[in-house]
Image (tube, rainbow, N blue to C red):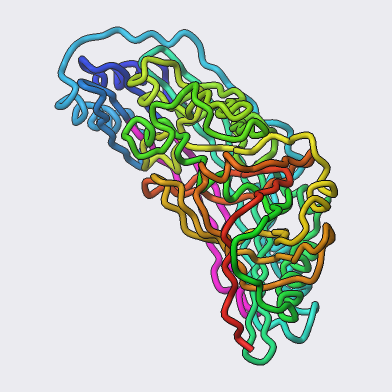
Amino acid sequence: MMEPEKASKIISKALGRGHFADIYLEETETTFIVYDNDRLEKLVCGSDKGAGLRAIYGDYHTAYAYTNSFAPEELMSLAESLARLTGSTQKNITIDEIKKIPFPEVKRPPQEESLAFKIDLVKKANQAARGASPEVAQVQVTYHDLHKKITIVNSEGLYIKGERLYTLLAVQVVTKRGEVIQTGYEPLGGAIGLEIFEKTPPEEIALKAAQRAILMLSAPKAPGGTMPVVLSAEAGGTMIHEAVGHGLEADLAEEGFSVYAGRIGEKVASSLITVIDDPTLMYQRGYYQFDDEGIFPEKTVLIENGVLKDFLYDRLSAMKAGKDSNGHGRRESYRFRPIPRMSNTYIAPGPHSPEEIIRSVDKGLFVKKMGGGQVDTISGNFVFEVTEGYLIEKGLLGEPVRGATISGNGPQILQIIDMVGNDLGFTIGTCGKDGQGVPVSDGQPTLRIPEIVVGGAIDQK
């Protein structure tokens, strides 16, 4: 642990005549396993440590430097480099207290389990997927756990210590029947330990992925055209994250790269739509107790009953806006400066039952699982793949269809959604922005979009 007196001197040197400075110290333990084609393809186990030193100065510019050493003399050398930009001055920075924030109870911390146990998890998933059908052509299982110890000290006198913990298992299955090839994917994870697999065993995750890929082999191609689409809660919040969420990050709004820039207080969505980002959802993949700038976050209502209420701020974007940060400054590691990021972003549940929503559609598409896609974060235009979809005919779920895509404009889609379910489902992922990735989850209830463009696939039979 860095002594408060030494930390104060380093920060004082880096701060100079600037507005703000901080030190971010990080120690990481990780295991990464890839099992592909029935063999152990990749195995990475190790630790890393480093420190990032930042100063905000002048017209809100950022100077940032990092090192993989905790040595005070090394950090002072970095501080002197930053001081060439921030200017030299003497400021007494007092550390009032050291705050230690314990992580919520974890029954089976991954860093305390054997490597053999983790490899066995991966092998069980592989075996289950392989055994699902002779038409399974390829299986890839990925396991990743990450344990971080972090310390943040800043020029406002903050000294805070805490931990981050993530566990992830993901299975991708490729099936083949003649010339038809289909893919199924299923992840499981969160800010939680290996006890997550006691409730949902790796075999169950693998079978979900395999069954999805097998089902789609028999499905006819999806019809194309403009039609009603029902997004199930199980489909997760991919659309809200990609097509809307990034536009609610304060740096993009401030730079004019968001359709929501300058629109606080305006109606930007259907009155049924409330969008929330909540880092405090315990054990969700985007959970944290304080952000990577040492700020305790709160549930942030971004859009309330269709009206734009707020953006996601880090310290820098909040300074520029003359506001306080709402605890969304995140970074991938000590090698990166913090920027505004989503955490657990979701559309709040509404008044309709999922069954009622499906019954309301005479002819359309039911999206049970969303796949990857492309998004223009400035305009909100998107195209997403549907990895599991079904026709809706006369208010009933019909046959599965394959190869569908849905395309539209995120902000416009939010305005026309006319039914919102009373359920809520989450998907997990790693969100990329400015070259760095952070763990997130995205959620939504069942939603009815009365009109959207559905693209049908070219039949490969």
Residues in magenta? 25-53
Residue 439: give x, y in percent of width and height: 55, 45
Residue 97 lies in magenta, yes or no?
no
Residue at the image point whose x is 67% and y is 33% from the top: 272
Residue 277: give x, y in percent of width and height: 59, 32
Residue 173: give x, y in percent of width and height: 67, 73
- Furthest residue toward bottom: 178
Residue at the image point whose x is 51% and y is 16% from the top: 98
379 relative to 455 in the view: left or right = left
Q: Main secondary structure of the magenta part?
A: strand
218 relative to 152 in the view: left or right = right
Along the line of sight, which residue is nearer the eye, 391 or 363? Answer: 363
Residue 97: give x, y in percent of width and height: 50, 11
Residue at the image point whose x is 61% and y is 38% from the top: 344
Vertical side of 422 occupied by 224: above or below: below
Residue 37 lies in magenta, yes or no?
yes
89 relative to 161 in the view: left or right = left
